[in-house]
Image (cartoon, grey):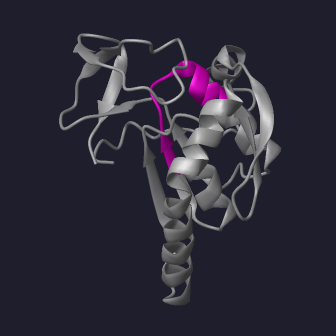
Amino acid sequence: CKRPELQGFLVTDANSRQVQHFKHSSRGMFMTFPSSPPFQLKVTDRGSLMAHWDREKELYVLMRASIAKQERSGVSPVVIDAGANHGTYSLYAAKLGATALAIEPQKVMVGNIMFSIEANKLEQKVRIYNNAVLDTFTGVHLRDEHVGNDGGVAKAFPGGNIQTLTL
């Protein structure tokens, strides 16, 4: 990310007000995500996550192959999960040994990702950014930013309190 002052955070800072705020916003239940390897995932709607898996499981196979190839060549893999939602790509990548950057503007989803990181003991592998990704640095307001819309497309409006990042 191009803006050094937007550092993201690790879940291990349990005393942080920011971490506690996001965890308080969390909601949902845990499920086992059926990838290989599987992992625990806090979700607001199990059905939508299973639909995600059915629709995108081939991408997980490709990610696994890419991470393995990078590791064989001596590269420490980093996965950027922009619009992380539940953090499935971030958690899967971290489970495979990569470092993951989960960028997610919705507070509910950031809280759920935090709980999922802890449940899978991936605290040192995933860094969370409560931001949106656009082609410019600005503040935006997202429709449904507090709803946890399970992967729906949110519209960004200028002038909000969510800081954007560019990649």
- Up the image or down, 156 lies above or below 63; here it is above
- Up the image or down, 100 lies above or below 24; here it is below
- Up the image or down, 74 lies above or below 110; here it is below
Q: Position of residue 125 (x, y in %)?
A: 64, 56
* Residue drawn at 52 percent across, 63 percent down: 58
Q: Position of residue 133 (x, y in %)?
A: 32, 36
* Residue drawn at 48 percent across, 89 percent down: 73
- Up the image or down, 95 lies above or below 106; here it is below
In the image, which residues are magenta? 101-112
Q: Position of residue 23 (x, y in %)?
A: 70, 22
Is 135 on the left-hand or right-hand side of 32? left
* Residue drawn at 59 percent across, 60 percent down: 93
* Residue drawn at 58 percent across, 40 percent down: 51
The picture quadrant where one finds residue 46 is top right
Magenta stretch contains residue 109: yes
Let me know if residue 2 appears in the view: yes
Q: Position of residue 86 (x, y in %)?
A: 59, 36
Let me know if residue 12 appears in the view: no
Is 103 on the left-hand or right-hand side of 50? left
Q: How many marks?
A: 0
Is 164 on the left-hand or right-hand side of 124? left
Magenta stretch contains residue 1: no
The picture quadrant where one finds residue 57 is bottom right
Q: Residue furthest left?
A: 136
